[in-house]
Amino acid sequence: MKVTGGWLVSAQFLRERFAREFITMSRYSPGVAWGCVAFYIAQLIGAVLLGAWLLKNGVSASESMAILALMLFVGTRFRALNNIVHECSHASFVRVREVNSTIGKICSALTLGSFVAYRHEHLSHHAHLGDYERDLDLQGIEAMRLHDPLTVRVILRHAVTPFIFRHLPHYLSVDLSLADGRAFQVMKLGLLALVVGLTVVAPLTMALFVILPYVVIYSALNYWADCLDHAGLIPGEDDLDGSRNVLAPKVLAWLLFPRNDGYHLVHHLFPNVPARHLSSAHNALMQDPVYRSTPNAVRGLPETAADDLAKV
């Protein structure tokens, strides 16, 4: 919270000021929503098939770089499906509420998770941001110490953690329970059986373009996303202080922050704004002088940590 001109400016102040403007931002129709999901699945399958083709036709040095790029791309498409799960948990993806649940369960099954469990944990995150006893999202990763103030040493620790797989116990989780219903449990078991069968037929293709991207890259991206979203900011006094935006160039944002998830502060201020409108909401919020002068809204890193990194 900040005091300006005698006024106490908080997340609630901004919500009251912009709520009427943002409530008109539309969700997808069911047809467009299903098409969006199909598009991400097609990207994922297409990348795997392209990787298989590269392996079949021999791999030069330049093609080795293409293989690494495809592995990263597959990991980002898993994250895109997870971002849709996130949107569906807020019922902000599709304008028909029941379709949000169905799509959320399907995308959760494709990433071997549970939509019902995710929604329960994530909504507690919004209600109790940074409170490890009640914020079930962050409670599960408390050992990652996102609450540590950002210094060069802490930033480097967060950067290195996925390379030594220290995050895996907290970020690699397969949920085969009945939480989403029998049909989705069967879907996940069938998907696992398919992966095992294809691994027998094409072990290198599946290892490089499905298993490693899911186990290593997807989990690492989720960890780094949590760091970018909240590291050094929790527990915050107010939602305005507890999250940050990462304003990446468009191409990088499309790859690493699918579904506009770089606008995490905007999302915490207005969790029901559809993800495709978060950039527009950010631009509107920039009209407010306090939001515009908040480092975690427009810069990302706190000034001290950013200045320290610049000296390294």
Image (cartoon, grey):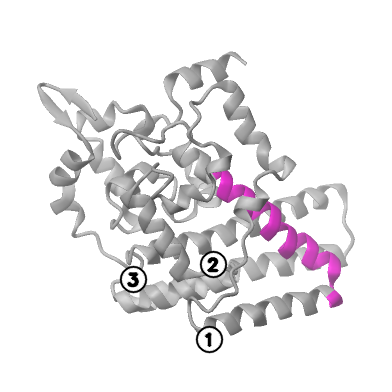
257 with respect to 236 (left or right): right
Residue type at mark 3: give it: Val
Can you identify the residue that label 1 sits on? Answer: 183
- Picture coordinates of residue 196 (x, y %)? 77, 76
Q: Nearer the viewer, mark 1 or mark 2?
A: 1
- For disc 3, the marked residue is 94
Q: Residues within 10 Å of mark 3 (few under 14, many from 20)?
A: many
Tell me, yes or no, if residue 248 can be seen here. Answer: no
The residue that appears at 85% across and 76% down in the rendered structure is 200
**Magenta-drawn stretch, dominant element (helix, strand or loop):** helix
Q: Is residue 295 visible?
A: yes
Q: Secondary structure at mark 3?
A: loop
Q: CA distance from mark 1 to mark 2?
A: 22 Å
* Residue drawn where x is 69% and y is 58% of the image: 215
> Farthest front residue?
133
From the viewer's perspective, is the residue at label 3 or at label 1 nearer? 1
Whichever of callouts 3 and 2 sits on the residue coming sooner in the sequence is: 2
Sequence-earlier tag: 1 or 2? 2
Decide which of 28, 144 is in the foreground and name it: 144
Question: What range of the chain is rendered magenta?
Answer: 200-224
**Residue 75 on image: x %, y %:** 64, 56
In the displayed structure, does residue 14 sit left or right of residue 88?
Answer: left
Q: Residue at x 32, y 45 (%)?
A: 266
Residue placed under numbered mark 2 in the picture: 40
- The three-letter amino acid code for the residue at tag 1 is Ala
